[in-house]
Amino acid sequence: MSTAATAHYTSTGLDTRKIAFWAFIGSECLLFGSLIATYLSYEGKSVVGPYPGEILDIPLTSISTFVLLMSSLAMVLALDGVTKGDNKQARIWLATTVLFGAIFLGFQAYEFQHFVHNGLTLSTNLFGSTFFVLTGCHGLHVLGGVIWLSSLLIQSYRNKLGPDKAMTVEIAGLYWHFVDVVWIVIFTVVYLIQRG
Amino acid sequence: MANSHDSGHTQEGPTGLWSWITTTDHKRIGIMYGATAFFFLLVGGLEALLIRTQLAKANNTFVDADTFNQLFTMHGTTMVFLALMPMSAAFFNFIIPLQIGARDVAFPRLNAFSYWVFLLGGIFINASFLIGAAPDAGWFGYANLTSTQFSPGLNVDFWGMGLQILGIASLAAAFNFIATIINMRAPGMKLMRMPVFTWMSFVTQILVVTAFPVITVALVFLMFDRMFGTTFYSPAAGGDLLLWQHLFWLFGHPEVYILILPTMGMVSEVLPTFSRKPLFGYAVVVYSGALIGGIGWAVWSHHMFASGMGAIADTYFAVATMLIAIPTGVKIFNWMATMWGGQIRFTTSMLFAIAFIMMFTIGGISGVMHASAPSDLQQTDTYFIVAHFHYVLFGGAMMGIFSAMYYWWPKVFGKLMSEGLGKVHFWITFVGLNLTFFPMHFIGMLGMPRRVYTYGPELGLESMNYAATLGSFLIGIGTLVMVFNILKTWKGPKQDVGKNPWGAATLEWAISSPPPVYNFSVIPEVRSRLPLWTEDGMSEVPDVPPEPVHVPGGSYWPLVTSFGLVGIFVGAIAKSVPIAAIAAVVLVVGIFKWGYEPFEM
Amino acid sequence: MSDQNSHEHPSVATYLKIAVILTVVTAVEVALYYVPEFGLLAPTLLVLSAAKFALVVMFYMHLKPDNKLFTNIFWPPLLLATGVILALMALLGNW
């Protein structure tokens, strides 16, 4: 992806796209922060069930959490491959990141349909509304990342993801890790710390 | 496809409608923002005149209650999101790259995308009028008036989705300008050498980046409640209506600083120029602006003093709000000190800037009165508040924008607007605005609530209301004078205003008016905060580039992508899955084509 | 110009070590979840996940070796988001 912003003198010597992307990550902090704030403010206030304690599956979600964490490892290894010009390493680890992301989404899809089957929908109660919108928003972000990384994987197979494209991959990595880090927070405050 | 070219020695860009539709040039995008925003300013002004006509007499029957609700909702929404913000955006676009010595913004196509999304969003929300379903629940849309139970029509859907669209435009622009200001300054243009307008705009973009995601979430909750039956704002399900108020005002208070800070920056450019004296206390003005932005994030619930938050919350928010008066007051003193001892030239632009200081101070004083929670319990939801925010937003922000228009018009268009007509515009507007809004302090204190479509004669407020209506029509006349000035200047003969008709100090005045398509033939090296007022303040910028300057071409992918994005919302509001699905495809294709298109700055 | 962007890359070995730490900490968190009557569960879990958060941000997202500018762009919104969470919980009475 050729870039307008890297061709010139810069005030900081840093990549303009990376600066813009960190600003974007800042905005995402506020986005997920508001969603989490709402979840926590409404926690324990549902008037009818199902309630978190009866329906959240900790073992299952622990596995999917682990998978997502490992996908971040795959991502840094993929970036390492691109930086070194090692196409094979780049492709293997990009594919692994995509796969792990897809597995995470698979677990989430299973979880969602299992919940719906057991009477928890978007409109059932406060827990349903806040849980599905928060984790659904996160899942959409994962999906977006999977699509983005897949397109990079395709570029790699076309031999168009050399070391000169390392910044593009680094930025995709920033996105991916951030989505992972948001999940760390969600897993802790939604699944592991239940208050009512 | 991007068709870049080398400008060679030509100064002008490509011509023709297609070149505007595909433009990625910040100067053209700025002009488009300005023209579109000005149009919406007239729309919002018309809505105001209709409101004031209805309220001129007690028990009036000019419009009914439902229509009145749509009028005040759209007046507020239009003025905030479709007039004030985009007018500032017009100046961010045209002026910031010139003030920092850059050839364009960091991401020119993203810049175009922001404009098109804004335009389509403005059309989307106003299209509601075509089906008689304009938003009608206030510009702040309190839950659960906005629920499907109490607002069954499409009005609130237009509002919620429209604001979501506009928010995306603002966020994209914010990332762009933050990257631009941090990374594209000319050599020697240290942060503390940047013009105050650029500095205030920088703080504003940081506020946008942090505040808009919150309203995004608030609106998602609202639209999901309406479309999918979620319970976010449902008291029956245990939901708290104050969740909406908190989320909205967490956005809404930074939003008012987003509205005022750029105009404070504009005035900070105009006053020194027409006082022939540098801004007094530059560093303090910059830090105060940053402090206003920072503290502005911590005061949101002063809009909620009547909602029963309890003494501790009330006290905290009252004190925090009063604290903001300090950096604000500092700026006012610095502006006055700038003029003190200067050689004042009372150009139209200067008159508006001086009026800004006076009017904003009046609005600030009533603001400090609202900051006291017990005092606000009497003032809230009355015309006293309406007086306050119109003094700061019209008497302040709008006057600042008029000042900036007269100031930078020659730079943008190579022509000076008529000073005679400008002064007529100024005086009519100045008298009109005070006649409209000053009585509202009294009307409010005497008990007239906001957002009521009529009132009884026994309140004894008819004559003051009538006076306010007269004032509003005066404002209308003043605006027409300005429109006439603009048209007359446009149609009038070519002028040769030179590079620096006002004798100003900052970089944008070092190049021709209008600037060449590539802005600077050679990127200057800057050695002073006031480059044109300082001996050896900057390196020379030749009239003709010594080597051809590469100028990026246009691209139509930003426009295509914006249609895809807005199309999804059109599908949603029309409850048509095919439309939304096709639009989603267009959006994704647009993004990929944009991403892989060769585009060189 | 891109030499300005080069910084010491953590080695593959470092990345693997961090992955191991993340795994172990997660396992500990899940194990603690099952400890009955563990009154300090919430604060402990918050500290542990904050540690995971910091590790990913500082090393996988490279903030620690990178130019301070990126850190300065990230922490204010993070602080604001945390403030929003705490303020909303307090103001809506779910502390």
Image: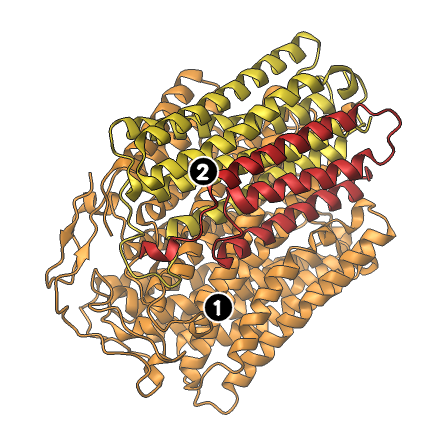
Chain colours: A yellow, B orange, C red
Q: Against B322, is B313 above or below? A: above
Amino acid type assigned to the residue bearing label 1 in the image:
Gly
In front: label 1 or label 2? 2
Amino acid type assigned to the residue bearing label 2 in the image:
Gly
Q: Percent x, y for residue B339? A: 50, 85
The reply to whether residue A142 is in sight is yes
Report crowding for label 2: few under 14, some 14 to 19, many 20 or more residues within 10 A (C-alpha): many
Nearer to me, B506 or A59: A59
Q: CA distance from mark 1 to mark 2?
A: 37 Å
Q: Chain of mark 1?
A: B
Q: Residue at x 44, y 24 (%)?
A: A96
Quadrant of residue B335 within the rendered picture: bottom right
Q: Residue at x 61, y 20 (%)?
A: B228
Which residue matches tag 1?
Answer: B265
Nearer to me, B342 or B515: B515
**Disc 2, SS:** helix
Q: Percent x, y for residue B272? A: 44, 81
As drawn, which residue projects farthest toward the top? A117
Q: Percent x, y for residue B157? A: 55, 30
Q: Against B366, is B2 above or below? A: above
**Figure quadrant of the N terminus of chain B:** top left
Quadrant of residue B233 within the rendered picture: top right
With B394 as the anchor, is B440 left or right in this view? right
With B199 as the anchor, is B297 left or right in this view? right
Same chain for the residues at labels 1 and 2, yes or no?
no
Q: Residue at x 48, y 81 (%)?
A: B279
The reply to whether residue B68 is in sight is no
Q: Residue at x 45, y 64 (%)?
A: B401
**Disc 1, SS:** helix
Quadrant of residue C42 within the rendered picture: top right
Nearer to me, B418 or A169: A169
Which residue matches tag 2?
Answer: A173
